[in-house]
Every structure is written in structure tokens, then in C-alpha cells.
Amino acid sequence: MPPMYAHRERRISGSSRGNNTASGNTSTEQLKMVITAEESARQKRTGQAKRRMEKAARRDNRIAQLEIIDSSSDNSNNNGLSDSERAELKGLLRTRENFEEQYDAENFSEEHVEFKRLHNEAFVALARFCQSDRNRRSITDADAADNENKDPNVFYLDGPDTATSLALIDKHGFDPSCCYVANRHLSTCKILQQHLPEENVIHATAAEALTPPSSDGSECKSDTVHVGSSFSDVDFACYYFDGCGGFTPHIIGMMSAALVPREATRMSNLHLLPKTTAIGYSLMGGNKDVIEKEMEINRALSNIARTRGMRTRHVLDDPWRYGVPAEIAKTEGGTFTSWMILEEEV
């Protein structure tokens, strides 16, 4: 080999090593940013649901006071509500109405009902797949045998029609104790508790429900629905963030809350063994910019997965591998739903 060629080859090799080092540094910095951002978000989320419930309670108490005054206005000793109080009552009622459940499955088209059904089937198939793959990777045969006799723990969002809960429990025989739900609407939480254990239903957002509780250990209940409790210590095989709207930071926040390991966990190396996990999410509100939104979410999820030494795969690129219905579609009307698998980086 001529000396000039050899020198050039060494220079290129050195450049590659330099690029690899720079790339590694960039990657490490990205992971630090993901972890730091989630730690900051957890601080903000802690107690958020409890504060929201306290605010709602104060609002309801004030509504009750004003309605009592208004209803007793026929009494000669009571002049009823003043104009300012009547305006206040109207505003409080309007605010409360905005927080009532708006989800109405009766308005779904036949095509949308079928779309939702197929994605519930995907949810079940992926939960089973992840459990099986975890057992295959188990350190001991005893662990695998023990897990074979249990249903995988799953977290999801469900509405007052309880369609996903019924698909899991009635159709596919899931143990209700393995099904965990969060919902911001108290009325829906009470309906879900008719099918699930009380402690498996949290009146909160998904991100709040997956965030560790406050350090003081405080927990409260509102009309038998948990407020301030958390599913952060539950080992979930599959998450289904359905009905998330079209705002990508909210979906990324849910994924981050669910999957970025806490500082104490990382320091002690507890529960950090990569465990195959599935993630489903929906974008609603139309298909405008949906490709860019999907890319933004999937890139964020890839970085989140790497905090656990894992990588991501697109489930619907190879549905047969995971037992997902081959006829499943990503879009129907204004709804987009996709699934990802997190698996050990090898």
C-alpha cells in the first residue's frame, strides 16, 4: 500500500473515531436532558391532582351556597341573589360544565367503532406479547413460570362506555386487578369502578397517575375515588394512551412520566432491567400535520427508551410478529393511532 494512501486511510479512521466520540457525547447529553426534564415535570405534577380537586370542591361549595340563597328567595326575609351573585353562579356553573365528561361513544360511526375495536385487540395482543417476551428473557425459570400464571399489568385511558375495560376483562379474560385507569372526570371514574377495583382507578390525568406521590405520603379521596395516589410503582407491560387530543407535548409527557426512571431508582439500579413494553397512543382533531406529529412523538419516545437501555420498533410495520390484526389501520376519520415496542438494546 503506498505511503500516501496509508496516511490518508489513517486520517479518515481518526476522523471517524472523532465523529463517533462526538456522537456519543451528544447522545449522552440528550439522555441527561430527557431525565432532567422529567424530574422537573414530576415536581410540578406532584400534588397537582389534589390541588385541582380542592379547587373543584371549593367551587361546588360556593355553587351550593348560591343555589340555596336563590331557592329561598320567596322567603320575605330573603331578597335572593344580587346581580353580581347571579353572574357569579352562572360563571361557576359554566366552568363546572366544561369539566364534565364530553366523551360519547353513541356518536361514533360504525367505521370508528370497528377502528377502536381493532386497536383494543392490538392492545391485548401486545400486552400478551410483552409478557411472553419478558418471560423468555427472565433470569430464572421460576420467575418465568410465576409470570406465566398472571395477566400482564396494563395502563390505559377509558371512557364512560368502558369499551377497553370490557374488551380486556369480558372478552379476553384479564384479571381486573391487572387493569389500571386514570380519568379526569369523576363521573367516569365511578362508572369504571363498577368493573375495576377501587384502587385501580385514579381521578387524575395519565401523567399525574404515573408520577410518584408527594414525599409527605399524603393521599386523599373524593367520593370514593382516589386523588393523590399513584401507579408509579406498578410494572406495566403495555400502555394505551387513547383519547389524548392532538397536542404532542401532552402525549410525550405521559410517556415520560411512565418510562423515565426516577433519580432514586437510577442511583440504586432498581427495576432498571430492560423489559419489553408496548406503547399505544392516539392523536385526534384531524390529520393535518399528523406525519410531523408522529415523528416528533416517536423521536421523543426513542430518547425516553434509551434512558432504560432500550430501543423502539414500529409495531404496525410487522403486525404478524406481534399477533396484531393485519387489517388494522392507523387512521379513521380524524383519529390517528399507532403502536411502538420498547425492547432491550442489543
Image (cartoon, helix red, strand yellow):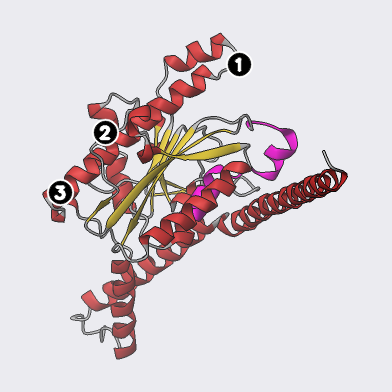
**Residue 26 placed where, x, y %?**
71, 54
Q: Amino acid at mark 1?
A: Ile
In the rendered structure, find residue 295 and report the number of the disc placed on it. none
For the C terminus, give its image quadrant.
Answer: top right
Mark 1 or mark 2: which is in front? Answer: 2
**Residue 262 placed where, x, y %?**
65, 44
Secondary element at image label 2? loop
Which residue is identified by label 2?
Answer: 325
Secondary element at image label 1? loop
**Residue 140 placed where, x, y %?**
59, 12
What whole-number distance in Å separates the C-alpha atoms at marks 3 and 2? 16 Å
Find residue 66 and report its image quarter: bottom left
Q: What residue is at 56 percent from the left and 36 percent from the top?
A: 233
Question: Against 199, is 174 above or below?
Answer: above
Front in this rendered view, residue 226 or 337: 337
Front in this rendered view, residue 281 or 145: 281
- Callout 1 touching callout 2 (CB < 8 Å): no
Q: Sort mark 2 into few (<14), some (14-19) or many (20+) by Cα contacts within 10 Å.
A: some
In the rendered structure, find residue 111 and report the number of the disc placed on it. 3
Question: Is any atom of residue 177 visible in this view?
Answer: no
What whole-number distance in Å separates the C-alpha atoms at marks 1 and 2? 31 Å
Secondary element at image label 3? helix
Q: Is residue 258 magenta?
A: yes
Q: Which residues are magenta?
A: 251-271
In the rendered structure, find residue 139 and report the number of the disc placed on it. 1
Q: What residue is at 40 percent from the left and 26 percent from the top?
A: 129
Question: Against 81, is 200 above or below?
Answer: above
